[in-house]
Image (spheres, rainbow, N blue to C red):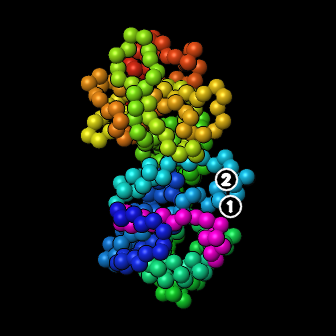
Amino acid sequence: MQIHYGLDKEFQIKNPVVTTGSFDGVHVGHQVILNRLRRLAREINGESVLITFHPHPRKILYPETAGKDLLFINSQQEKIELLKNTKLDHLIIVNFTLEFSQTTSVDFVRKILIGKLNAKRIIVGFNHHFGHNREGDYEYLLELGKFYNFEVEEIPEQDIDNEAVSSTKIRKAILEGNIQRANAYLDHQYIINGLLGKSTKEISGIKNPAYSIQIDEECKLVPPDGIYAVHIIAGNIYSKGMAAIQRPLDFTYDSRKIMVDVFLFDEKVEINKKNGTVFFHKQIRDGSVFKNSQLVLKEFEESKEEIEELIY
């Protein structure tokens, strides 16, 4: 996957098939869109393209209302890694500013999708809107397509157990500690990626290596305090483990202040100062497990036994 920052360069993309959106979580609905994007690109000997925006438009347009407390399933780096796994050809990350927000829907199509990319096909998700004041939609794209000679396709809303999938519902499930529900929506494990360092959290009698993971973005969504079944990958190292999440007593939301410690079940692993990804499977204990800010040996052993049975 080629990553492009901004729209100032000259793009050399063959027969682009394009979609746009934030794609937070890269969930099952997003994956359906991306799969269709790649399939259509192959049909015309073209390349698949996703245009996304950073920061999230709501953070810029509504900093004191809708964007103020908005949290994200993925950090920017996590989203990039997940998108790489989809075999997308091109990711274009546009710096979203107040000035850019004034771009009308017709100018977005005329100047960017056609003028910059020469898009051959445009794919949109269910109820997609774009442009200044969200004035553009699927029907509007159909009309513009007749004039600018591109095809348009809308992907239906996706369901899990007859319930519509959305990033909002996934965020709610994660905030409630319902990791298994969130993972079903995502069609992959919820993750936290970051630099690993030696943990200061200790459990008397436990020799398992413990690491803390550094969260880089203040708006990264982190599950509630408690114990979680996880596995971790750092380079070519894999280990099952137990993640302990704990917020400081005077916590006001900044994900970088949340303590995320991982106790590895493989005692021979050494991953200090490496970048790693923690994959969450299930909440095993809620925040009441912490006593005087420490886990106790009995709770660790009980959690470990349960996790060993859960993760094969």
305, above or below 100, in the image = above
Residue depicted at 57% across the width and 77% down the height: 108
C-alpha separation, residue under disc 2 versus residue under disc 1: 7 Å
Where residue 13 is drawn, which disc sits there?
none
Q: Amino acid type of disc 1? A: Leu
Residue 269 locus on image (x, y percent): 28, 28
* Residue 76 in view here: yes
Image quadrant in which you'd find residue 170: top right
Q: Which residue occupies 58% across, 29% down?
A: 247
Q: Circles 2 and 1: CB distance less than 8 Å?
A: yes
Does 118 sit left or right of 207 as displayed? right
Circle 2 — which element? loop
Observer-nearest of 117 and 175: 117
Q: Which residue is mark 2?
A: 67
Q: Position of residue 69 (x, y in %)?
A: 67, 46
Viewer-side residue, 75 vs 124:
75
The magenta segment is: 88-104
Q: Position of residue 51 (x, y in %)?
A: 48, 67
Judge whether 205 appears above or below 76 on screen.
above
Q: Let me know if residue 243 appears in the view.
A: no
Quadrant into which the N terminus falls:
bottom left
The residue positioned 47% from the left and 74% from the top of the image is: 8
In the image, taking residue 44 as reference, residue 156 lies left or right, namely right
The amino acid type of the residue labelled 2 equals Gly
Residue designated by label 1: 61
